[in-house]
Image (cartoon, rainbow, N blue to C red):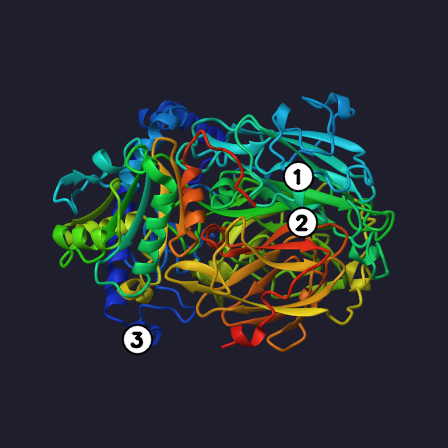
Amino acid sequence: MARMNRRSMLGALAAAPLAGGLVARASGLDDRSRDVTRRRYFPNVELTTHEGKKVRFYDDLIKDKIVVINFMYADCEGICPTITTNLVKAQKILGNRIGRDIFMYSLTLSPEKDTPAALKHYAKMHGVKPGWLFLTGKPDEIEGLRRSLGFSTGNLKLDKDKANHIGMVKYGNERREWWGMVPGKAKPTWIAESILWMDETNQKPPRG
Amino acid sequence: MANISKRNRKREKEILDASKNRRELIAAQLSRRDLMKLGLLTSAGFLIPKNGLSARAPQFGGGGFGGGCFGFYGRGGTPVSPPTTAYVEAMPIPPIAQPVANADALTGPLPQAAPNTAAGEGRTRTHQAFTTLPPQKYYEVHQREADIIVHPELPVQKLWTFNGTVPGQTYVSQYGQPNLVRNFNDLPANNGGFGIQSVSTHLHNGHTPSESDGFPCDFFGQTKWYDQHYPNVLAGFASTHPPNCDINESMSTLWYHDHRVDFTAQNVYKGLAGFYLLFNQFDTGNETTGFRLPTFPDFDVPMMFNDKNFDPDTGLLFFDLANRDGILGDKFLVNGKIQPFFNVKRRRYRFRWLNGGPSRFYQFYVTKQDNTNHPFYVIANDGNLLPNPVLTSNGVRIAVAERMDVIVDFSSFAPGTKLYINNRLEQCDGAGPTDNIVAANQGNKVLEFRVTSDAVSDGSVNPATNPSFYAVPAREPEDITRCFKFDRQNGQWVINDKFFACDDVRFKVKRNNAEIWKLEGGFNWQHPVHIHFEEHQIVKRNGQTPTLIERGRKDVTRLGENDDVELFFRFRDFVGRYPMHCHNTVHEDHAMMLRFDIDDVGNTNESDCDGHHH
């Protein structure tokens, strides 16, 4: 862009329709930002649950919900069993809210191997209760989700190493646009407490 | 403007092509040496400026944004911000906070020692020093959304502010005059994409009782308020280890920022930070008295540096929610403006440089128009005046949350001369800088000084005369040594293999103990480690006495890759909960933090140093 002083720039902003749109959008920020966030982070790809049901990622799993998301794969012998066990305990702490207003999702990093049946077996083996879905899908779309949801790293060597995959658990409230992460290896009570911050009626500071 | 938009699209394609080319280079596993042989990399480590290879080539060559490795490794999903013209607006100086007349003038009930839960206070613990060090000045601050212009070529931004400005108002305080700040959470329901409306405001480096410190778990929600009591007292007033209230423990440049657990990076990025300055009978703010440092506020100027990203489509502030390694911005802001200018008179200035994050390390030089270097003096590290000024010809390194007070002398320049604050430290991703110092014409010139012809006098001390400020307090034998390894496990950040939790007290320090803490860095990542409440001295860095600039009192210590750093502390006066954490706010939010408590018993947790060292 050629150098412009402030006055000429402001003049240009006012005159041109495109730039005028920029300004108008700024005031409509709150309505738009959820849409921007959806497009950037939550592709509406089709996934299959461990019950064999087809779902759309954004429309069916994320929109208007408090959600808990992690990545795993069924024959992972590293951190997955610990994390799944912690999440099972967190599910127990959160009780019947899971499946009512809080939803848990585990996406496989091995969509080629992890069929819905394999994931169902994994869920059953760990004592997973309703309200928590294990999900598989097209490998490239799962890879896209892994990146957009924050389960990849810029360090490419680390990123390729599946055994060293990201052990964080993402939690959020889509409507309020609150998105945080808690380590999957943290204590289940802490994981549950972090998830409950996403309940907008709960603004109490934590225990301790 | 339609032209610009078209150019943007063309440019986006260039960027995509460039990133594709770079991916191919990486996939081919070409080493730095191979790239140089192929003529694709300069000796300074940059991709050569060729369209479709270095995303920066067409637009920013020579424009102060030549920093080489942008987009090379880590920026991944982070968009390239819209172009902005450099140096079109003056750098703002944050307004000075004004106290209300007295306690009665505060909105709401009179302050009290116990939390006033019934009246909507979010505090949960009683003030420790409310009656012994009673407030003399009362402030009221409202955290609220405001319309902020970061650059005239970008749309108005809805940022979160303290009383309507970014940075927030500057508190100007005197030792011996305790403050009470009534802190209201008036943040809006909609966050515009990131940030959370529950907050905990930390006074960084304050000798502050735990309940007023802004502990990450003391957050309070919308419509609540929180009374924070800042005693502004010299450390050691109740110590069993004289000298008590040693003047050599005076602090000067503090800052405040949001510290809400898991959401600090988002909330601070959105604007919740400001300065808090402390003066005393030596560091007076008047160049005719005391140490005769340049007079505040005319010649003593705080500068907060941030790097941020803006959405290429909307021009609005963009925070990458998918990043856990560290966020690097491609726009450089000083006191909330992108690449401002600042008029200076032909004399000495004290600048209080603060790296406000979120993740980048800087090495700031003052660069002349012909790209030669203008040396300056560092007089304070982390807001603590050094024993003597330190002249530097190779800039000063500043990690997130570190402060460096510097004296820059413009007296030798003709009116009309331009100089630049120039970041010449190469950093490619959140892991930390490469330690390459780029050529002066390739750095990030974040601010332009313009020397004016105004008549001027200068009564400030000439640092070349080597004046003495504060001596480093003598150390005493430690009561205990504790060891901490900062590392990464499965993309999660750990200290001694554990994660932060509010109710997990990792160790207890006995009040009046002297302690040595050994910090160890992990492979491949750098961390600026901040410890609340008590300052420390760096005893040794990798077995060596630290540099002159680090030979003072610190509250943030940079931990380089595999570094071993030994710190000395005394813990005095107050009890309660405090954190130690990485101040790369993205690491911090991904659990690289621990809680320790100070009480009158203590324990020996985390002192098994053999277990932690390799």
**Residue contact between numbered discs 3 and 2, judged by CB atoms under 8 Å:** no
Q: Residues within 10 Å of mark 3 (few under 14, many from 20)?
A: few
Q: Residue, x 39% and y 60% (percent of image)?
A: B69
As drawn, the label of residue B576 is 2
Q: Amino acid at mark 2?
A: Gly
Q: Residues within 10 Å of mark 2 (few under 14, many from 20)?
A: some
Residue B410 drawn at (x, y percent)? 70, 52
Disc 2 is placed on an element classified as strand
Q: Amino acid at mark 1?
A: Arg
* N-terminal-most mark, 3 or 2: 3
Disc 1 is placed on an element classified as loop
Q: Residue, x 76% and y 22% (percent of image)?
A: B104
In what quadrant of the picture does the N terminus of chain B appear?
top left
* N-terminal-most mark, 1 or 3: 3
Residue B4 visible to the viewer:
no
Q: Residue, x 56% and y 38% (percent of image)?
A: B219
Q: Real-space Cα distance between discs 1 and 3?
A: 61 Å
Q: Which residue is mark 3?
A: B34
Residue A91 visible to the viewer:
yes
For this rendering, which residue is in front, B354 or B351?
B354
Q: Residues within 10 Å of mark 1 (few under 14, many from 20)?
A: some
For this rendering, which residue is in front, A39 or B496?
B496
As drawn, the label of residue B125 is 1
